[in-house]
Amino acid sequence: MTDATIMPHSQRGEGSFGDYVALLKPRVMSLVVFTAMVGLFAAPGALHPFEAFCAVLFIATGAGASGALNMWWDADIDVVMKRTAGRPIPSGRVAPDEALALGLGLSGLSVVMLGLAANWAAAGLLAFTIFFYAVVYSMWLKRSTPQNIVIGGAAGAFPPMIGWVAATGSVSLEAVLMFALIFMWTPPHFWALALFMKSDYEDAGVPMLTVTHGRKSTRRHIWVYTLLVAALAVGMGATSIGGPLYLLVAVVLNLLFIKGAWDILRRDEDSAQADGYATEKRFFFLSLVYLFLHFGAIWAETLLKPVGLGGW
Ligand code: HEM
Ligand SMILES: CC(C)=CCC/C(C)=C/CC/C(C)=C/COP(=O)(O)OP(=O)(O)O
C-alpha cells in the first residue's frame, strides 16, 4: 500500500465511533454473517444457545477484521474511486496504522475466541478465511488478474462452512454445497456492479473484467455464471439441505435471476448508458435478495424439520 495521496496523519481529525465501525464493512458483512448463522443452525450438532451466539459473534468479528485489513491495504485505490473515496482512511478520519491495528487485533481475538467457544477446526477455518480475503484476494489477486473475484470469491463462500464446522467439528457435503452456492454466485453479483462502476476501476487501475475485457464480454460471463449457479441452486433442492419450500424458492428466484442475466446479455451499450445502467443495478440488487432468500430457505427447512414439514 502507498498512502501518498491520502491526507497526512497530522491533518487527520480523530475518527468517530462510526468511522471505526465503517472499517468493518458492516453492510456487506451482515449478509456474510447471515450465511454463517444458517450454516451453524442447519448443522446437526447441538451447540448450547450461548455457545452458538458466541460463535456467530466471533465469526462476525473475524469478518469485520478482514474488512478493516482490506481497507488498510486498499486505501491508495479507495481514495481514487468515487464509491470509496469517503471511507474513513482515504478521507483522513482514521490513520492507516489504526486500521491495521484494529484489523490484526480483531483477527487474533476472533480466532482465539471462536476456538474457545466452539472448536479449533472452526477457528482454523476462520483464520484461513481472513487470510484469504486480506492477503490472497486483496493483496495479490485484486490488482493482478481479471479472475480476481472468481478465485477470491472463495473467501466470501467460507462463512457457512465455518458455521457448520463450529457446530459439528467437521466438514460435510451440506457445508460444501453452501460454499459452492456462494462461490458460483459471486461472479454475477460482482460483475453486475463492475458494469456500472467500470470507470472507478479504470481510474484506480484495478484489472476488473469490465476494464480488461470490456462490458460485452462481462455480460457474457454474467450469463454463463448465472446458468451455472442456477443449476447448482435448484439441484441443491434435491439434497439433504433442500426440501419442498427450498425448491419452490430456488425455482422462482433462479427464473428471475436468469431473466435478469438475459436482459443484461441482450443490452446494447447505448441504451445501458442512456438509462444509467438501470438493468444492471436492478440485477445487482436482485443478487443480494437472491442469496439472502436461498439461505433463508435452507434455514426454514431446518426449522420445519422437527414438526415433520422440512426436508425430504
Ligand atoms: C470476492 C467477492 C466479492 C466481491 C468482490 C464483492 C464486491 C462488492 C462490492 C464492490 C460491493 C459494493 C460495496 C459498496 O457499495 O461499498 C458489494 C456490495 C455488497 N456485497 Fe459483495 N462482493 C463479494 C462477495 C460478497 C459476499 C460473499 C457477500 C455476502 C455473502 C456479499 C454481500 C454484499 C452486500 C450485502 C452488499 C451491499 C452492501 C451495501 O448495501 O452497501 N458480497 N459487494
Ligand atoms: C468470516 C470472514 C473472514 C468473512 C469474510 C467474507 C468476505 C471475504 C467477504 C468478501 C466480500 C467483499 C467485501 C468483497 C469486496 O471486495 P473489495 O474488497 O474489492 O470491495 P471494495 O472495493 O468495496 O473494498
Image: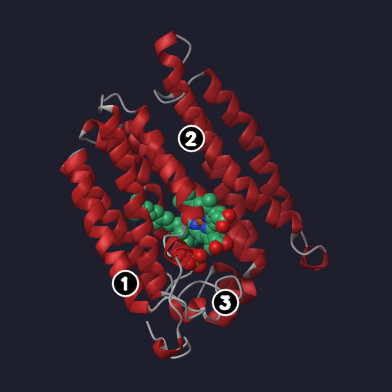
Q: Nearer the viewer, residue 262 or 131?
A: 131
Q: Residues within 10 Å of mark 3 (few under 14, many from 20)?
A: some
Q: Earlier in the sequence, mark 1 or mark 2?
A: 1
Query: Which residue in the structure is indicated by mark 3?
Result: 81
- Locate residue 202: give its quadrant: bottom right
The residue at 39%/43% (across/down) is 179
The reply to whether residue 288 is visible in this rendering is yes
Residue 247 appears at what percent x and percent y? 55, 24
Query: Which residue in the structure is indicated by mark 1?
Result: 100
Secondary structure of the residue carrying tag 2 is helix
The residue at 36%/54% (across/down) is 63
Q: Is residue 258 above or below residue 18?
A: above
Q: Which mark is residue 19?
A: none
Query: Which residue in the structure is indicated by mark 2?
Result: 295
Mark 1 vs mark 2: in front: 1
Residue 293 appears at what percent x and percent y? 55, 35
> Quadrant location of the N terminus?
bottom left
Question: Amino acid type of disc 2?
Answer: Phe
Mark 1 vs mark 3: in front: 1
Q: Earlier in the sequence, mark 3 or mark 2?
A: 3
The residue at 53%/70% (across/down) is 208
